Image: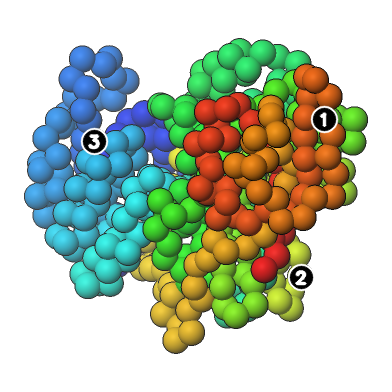
Amino acid sequence: MGNTLKIGLFGFGCVGQGLYHVLNNSTGFKADIVKIGLKDKNKPRTIGKELITFDKWEILNNPEINVIVELIDDADEAFLIVSEALKKGKHVVTANKKLLATHLNELYRLQEENNVSLLYEASACGSIPIIRTLEEYFDNEELEKVSGIFNGTTNYILTKTIIEKLSYAEALKQAQDKGFAESDPTNDVEGFDAKYKAVIVALHAFGLIIKQEEVLNIGITTLHENDIKYASEKGYKIKLTPIIQKLGGDKVSVFVAPRFIKEHSHLYNVDNEFNGVIVEGQFSGEQFLQGRGAGSYPTGAAVLSDISALSHGYKYEFKKYSQKHAPVFTNDVFVEVYLRYNHEEDLKQIPFHEVTEKYASRDYKYIIGKVNLQVLIANKSYIINNHLFLSLVKDSVTK
Ligand code: HSE
């Protein structure tokens, strides 16, 4: 597409304002924001009235606008906007991980059918260029695993509460004030946000479109000081980590859970809102990418990078998705976990396949061993409702 980008921007929250700032302070690249579509008529705005509209169709039906940048919160409204834009032959840049993870199949089809580009680098791990790295650099090499820290808010909370001894409420408030948290932070702390990103990454790493509802996410809401004490005594940190791993027989396992991180891990010193991604290739071995996973300017910078790529006619090829022998998603794997429990009945409810360690005093009980991921999926509500805490002790799964 030549280099005249006429942008219709939806949303002017944390990321929208970040993009506006980054765009206005970038030299060498200019894009023209024609209109900004907003929802709330009563919010005071720092942008000129002539730029604003409250009618999405004024943007979607404007033939001058050839790029839609979608940065709103509501995934359902975003789906309407993005799918309409693609059908109308407009290119789309979005940072909306819930939208993508929920509608990957349909959005993939729409951008193919309408021969337009749908880019979403900012949707996963903020400013870390993980999608483009997987798309462009690892487009041919078979990968073994992609794992890491994909959520800035939980990493910020875990850093501030465990290392700096702030209260959970204060750490969460800071994450919200700094613009890291989702508008509903349960999406962060319950692991949904990290799961959406894992689903997006799985497409580019392994050519897999997974139903996000089938992917387990266990968050950090039931973390107790006994768990922190246990981890600290062993010299571990606790991080919320997605694991996207290939197993024999072309199966891929994807899930999100807290994990004990040992000092030698690349992820050990990835603190605060930073994210880290470890990509393990069949031949290249381990690569580690680190950067700001959340925040207005870093995420705005990732959006700008996509807009810039559009000006060069860039489009994802989805090479791994198009290949003949795409892998299959499975939850039938074993994970090694620490589970803090309350009563022996908890262990009847959550049967372990192998036990390597068990401790039980009146106030603190834990078990370490192997359990099938499907058992954890079936008992996710039980774990949360009974305030049990689960943490992976290994960074990989077994068949
Ligand atoms: N709430 C998200 C996070 C924002 O904390 O990582 C970036 O996607």
Write down the residue under mark 1.
360
- Mark 2: secondary structure: strand
x, y percentage for residue 93? 35, 52
Spatial CA span between label 2 and label 3: 44 Å
Q: Give the x, y percent position of residue 189.
A: 54, 31
- In the rendered image, which quarter is residue 390 located in? top right
- Residue at x 50% of width, y 36% of height: 381
> Looking at the image, is 365 positioned above or below residue 122?
above
Marks 3 and 1, how far apart at CA: 58 Å
The answer to which of 158 and 279 lies nearer the viewer is 158
Mark 3, residues whose alpha carbon is within 10 Å: few (<14), some, or many (≥20)? many
Whether residue 325 appears in this view of the structure is: yes
Relative to 212, say whether 366 is above or below: above
SS at circle 3: strand
Residue 220 or 188: which is nearer the viewer? 220
Q: In the image, is the residue at mark 2 within 8 Å of ligand 1 by its beta carbon?
A: no
Q: In terms of depth relative to the viewer, which is nearer, 110 or 187?
A: 187
Measured as percent of width and height from the top left, residue 331 is found at 54, 61
Using residue 298 as the reference point, say whether residue 104 is left or right of it: left
Residue type, mark 1 in image: Ala
Residue named by callout 3: 36
- Badge nearest the viewer, 2 or 3: 2
Sequence order check: which comes first, mark 3 or mark 1? 3
- Residue 267 visible in the current orientation: no
Circle nearer the N terminus (2, 1): 2
Who's the residue at 54% across and 43% down the image?
Answer: 379
Q: Position of residue 306 (x, y in %)?
A: 43, 55
Q: Are marks 2 and 1 in contact (CB under 8 Å)?
A: no
Question: Residue 240 is drawn in which quadrant?
Answer: top right
- Residue located beneath label 2 in the image: 285
Tell me if residue 392 comes above or below residue 344 in the rendering. Answer: below
